[in-house]
Image (cartoon, rainbow, N blue to C red):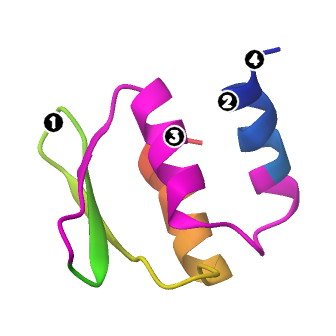
Amino acid sequence: MGSTKKNLARMRRNLQDWRIEDLQAIARAEGIEWRHKGTSHCIFVRRDGATLPVPAKRPIKPVYIKLFLEFLGE
C-alpha cells in the first residue's frame, strides 16, 4: 500500500490535525490540480472542472477534510 493510500486511510479514520501540504500531496497523487499563490485558500480543481476551496490555515478543520474526501470520490 503506497503512502498516499495510507494517508487517505488515516484521513478517513481521523479528520483532525491535517495540513494543507498533506492535502496537496494527496491531490497531486490522485491527478487533481491545485492552486495556492499567497492567498488564504487553496483551490483544488478536478478534471471535470469542479472546484473545492480549502482554507490554508493550520490545522484544517475536520469539515474541510470531510469535503475533501467527498471531492476525491471517497
Q: What element carries label 3?
A: helix
Q: How far apart are marks 1 and 2 (CA)?
A: 22 Å
Which amino acid type corresponds to the residue marked 3 in the rendered image?
Ala
Q: Which of marks 1 and 2 is nearer the N terminus?
A: 2
Q: Is mark 2 on a helix, strand or loop?
A: helix
Circle 2/circle 4 CB separation < 8 Å: yes
Left or right: 55, with 63 as reference point: left
Q: In which quarter of the image is the N terminus?
A: top right
In the rendered image, which residue does mark 3 sit on?
25
Which of the two marks, 1 or 2, is nearer to us in this view?
Answer: 2
How crowded pointer 2 is (Cα within 10 Å; few <14, some 14-19, many 20+) is rated as some
Circle 3/circle 2 CB separation < 8 Å: yes
Magenta span of residues: 11-38
In the rendered image, which residue does mark 2 sit on?
4
Q: In which quarter of the image is the C terminus?
A: top right
Q: Distance between the residues labelled 3 and 2?
A: 8 Å
